[in-house]
Image (tube, grey):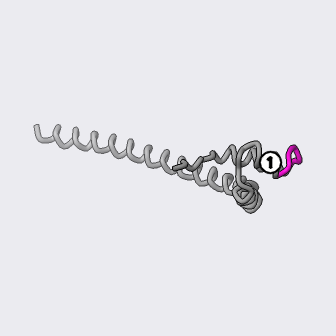
Amino acid sequence: MSKRRTFTPEFKAQVVLEELSGIKNKAEICREYRLRPQVFSRWQEEFLERAPEIFATKRSRGDEQERIAELEQMVGRLTMQLETAKKVSNVLTSLSSGKGR
């Protein structure tokens, strides 16, 4: 039984870029890395289909950063409110226990 080889996404991208940049042709790549042409073609097709996502994620990262900033501000406000509530609670507790004496 032969084991299936697994390849990292980085390796797949490197191999596809070698062909796209003209460093090597498809046949050379398949021989060097012992890949079936169908496997290489599938990698290349997936790479080209997902290429636009690289540029789209920059915009969404900006949105994510904006959302993170909003949430951090909210955490700050809630922390301040909690600290204030604790102080008021301590003052009220001390006043009520002081009156009882």
The image shows residue 54, relative to residue 87, as above or below, that is below
Residue at (63%, 45%) from the top-left corner? Answer: 8
In the depicted view, which residue is nearer to us: 51 or 83?
51
In the depicted view, which residue is nearer to us: 48 or 23?
23
Looking at the image, how many numbered discs can be counted on the residues? Answer: 1
Q: Is residue 24 a member of the stretch shown in magenta?
A: yes
Q: Is residue 52 visible?
A: no
Horizontal and vertical percent position of residue 23: 87, 43
Few, some or many C-alpha atoms within 10 Å of disc 1 (few <14, some 14-19, many ≥20)?
Answer: some
- Lateral position of residue 18 relative to residue 3, left or right: right
Q: Is residue 31 a member of the stretch shown in magenta?
A: no
**What residue sits right under mark 1 in the picture?**
17
Span of residues in magenta: 21-26
In the depicted view, which residue is nearer to us: 27 or 12?
27
The main secondary structure of the magenta stretch is loop
Q: Point out the residue furthest to the right here.
A: 22
Residue at (82%, 46%) from the top-left corner? Answer: 28
Residue at (68%, 52%) from the top-left corner? Answer: 62
* Quarter containing the C terminus: top left
Horizontal and vertical percent position of residue 82: 38, 46
